[in-house]
Image: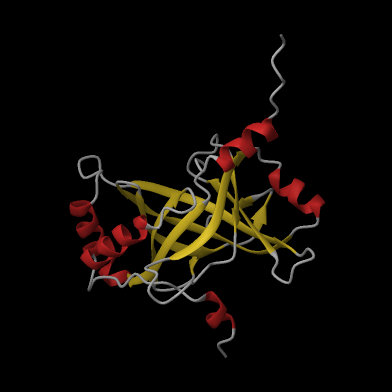
Amino acid sequence: MSQPVTTAMDSLTAALKSNIIPNQEYLLQGSVLDSAVEVLLHRLRGLCDNVDSGPETFHDHEMCFSIRGTNLQPLLLRVRRALDYQDMPWQLRYIGQPEIGDKNRPTIVRSSIDIGTSSTVVEFLTELGCRMDFEYIVRGYMFRKGRMKITVSKIFKVGQVAQGKPAESMEPMSQSYLVELSVLAPSGQDAIAEDMRSFAEQLRPLVQLEKVDYKRLQHMP
């Protein structure tokens, strides 16, 4: 007897039901002044797994898109491309609305799905009706501690863009670095949030990683 044909959608549906796709991001955020970032990097080198080889570096251009549907909240999409590795695939990321949850939850939890794409993804999103809200250049360091990812990033304004390439001159948006501690995991693995809280405690007082209430920030004067 012939076997039933399995489509990509069937495989994706089965994977979702089996709860094996990492579609939840657990997140803590903070910042550190430029003058203190070297001390933080030194602490991370001692705590993280890639202590011998040192942290990975990145230099990316990120564009943030949104599209409004039937729901009140817009659909948020991010496109990121590596400026230091031009041959790498572009990355398209869906980010859901943060679930702050109760005050006892250690981290923010939000839906997150990443896929690799070609360089035509921006044109594709534009044709779908997506609007680019903002863009920036991000450069920094990435550390690993088990399943946890820690990034220390400097964010720059994008100058005049010629033929899709940002200008060489970049202006920093602040005198500080963004620090993010995150884990991508399948739904329901809330125990990882406790590990993240424990790791964040080891970085104090150099940086205070915490849940950021985006809705409260949007309503601040």
Drawn side of residue 134 relative to residue 37, left or right: right
Regarding residue 87, the answer to whether it shows in the image is yes
Is 32 or 68 nearer to us in this picture? Answer: 68
Regarding residue 177, the answer to whether it shows in the image is no
Q: Residue at x 30, y 64 (%)?
A: 197
Q: Residue at x 35, y 51 (%)?
A: 148
Q: Is residue 211 above or below residue 115?
A: below
The residue at the far front in this view is 1
Give the quadrant of the C terminus. Answer: bottom right
Is 171 or 5 nearer to us in this picture? Answer: 5
Residue 57 on image: x %, y %: 37, 47
Q: Residue at x 40, y 69 (%)?
A: 105
Is 49 or 135 nearer to us in this picture? Answer: 49
Q: Is residue 32 above or below residue 185?
A: below
The residue at the far bottom in this view is 221
Give the quadrant of the N terminus. Answer: top right
The residue at the far top in this view is 1
Residue 6 on image: x %, y %: 69, 25
Using the rendered view, name the quadrant where residue 180 is placed: bottom left
Residue 147 on image: x %, y %: 35, 47
Q: How is the image coloured?
A: secondary structure
Q: Residue at x 53, y 75 (%)?
A: 214
- Count of labels in the image: 0
Q: Is residue 65 above or below residue 81?
A: below
Residue 14 on image: x %, y %: 60, 36
